[in-house]
Image: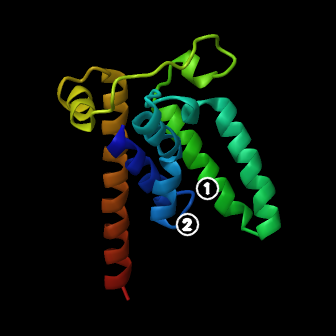
């Protein structure tokens, strides 16, 4: 759901997190992949592995909240990052053994090497995961609709002066 995560960050940036950088929101929305994709390339672990676990999410969120106090980071910034991280997990339609790792008794086994072209083909052309595909299309549509509405609002308010 590559484009979907970007679309969700765009929606968040245009609605609840308008004060946050779009780039920051996009990066935070990819935190599980930032953890898991290098682990897959380097160690043959699954592309949806420990970085997509609720346990890792909760530990990471707690760590961010603790560290933010020490560095006096704005609470809203940390909240935005945590929300984007969680949105990634929700948008990926994760299997229970991934989401509940390490409590689910399915071992993380080596996977074949990650092939981006093959994954893009499977997702966008073959539509192997139709529910996730349509969720992504809805997110992209909403993000684009918000952009259009925002630009029309800006034009109407600037021409009315």
40 relative to 82, above or below: above
For image coordinates 52% across by 42% down, the residue present is: 35
Closer to us: 77 or 38: 38
Contact (Cβ within 8 Å) of mark 2 with mark 1: yes
Image quarter (top left, top right, bottom left or bottom right) of the C terminus: bottom left
Closer to us: 130 or 96: 96
Mark 1 lies on a secondary structure that is helix
Residue 70 in the figure: left or right of residue 15: right
Q: Residue furthest bottom?
A: 161
Name which quarter of the figure residue 16 lies in.
bottom right
Residue 133 in the figure: left or right of residue 62: left
For image coordinates 44% across by 38% down, the residue present is: 42
Measure the C-alpha gap from mark 2 to mark 1.
8 Å
Mark 2 = which residue? 20
Name which quarter of the figure residue 72 lies in.
bottom right
Mark 1 = which residue? 80
Closer to us: 83 or 146: 83
Q: Residues within 10 Å of mark 1 (few under 14, many from 20)?
A: many
Residue 117 in the figure: left or right of residue 17: left
Position of residue 101 measured from the top left corner of the image (x, y, whole percent):
63, 22
Position of residue 83 measured from the top left corner of the image (x, y, whole percent):
60, 47
């Amino acid at each position: 759901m590559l484009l979907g995560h970007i679309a969700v960050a765009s929606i968040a940036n245009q609605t609840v997190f308008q004060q946050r950088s779009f780039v920051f929101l996009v990066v935070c929305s990819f935190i599980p992949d930032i953890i898991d994709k290098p682990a897959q390339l380097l160690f043959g672990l699954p592309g949806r592995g420990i970085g997509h676990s609720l346990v890792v999410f909760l530990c990471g969120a707690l760590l961010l909240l603790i560290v933010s106090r020490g560095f006096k980071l704005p609470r809203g910034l940390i909240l935005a990052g945590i929300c984007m991280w969680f949105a990634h997990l929700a948008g990926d339609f994760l299997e229970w053994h991934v989401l509940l790792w390490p409590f689910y008794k399915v071992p993380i086994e080596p996977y074949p090497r990650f092939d981006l072209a093959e994954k893009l083909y499977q997702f966008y052309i073959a539509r192997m995961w139709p529910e996730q595909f349509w969720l992504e299309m809805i997110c992209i549509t909403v993000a684009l609709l918000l952009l259009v509405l925002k630009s029309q609002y800006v034009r109407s308010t600037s021409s009315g002066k």
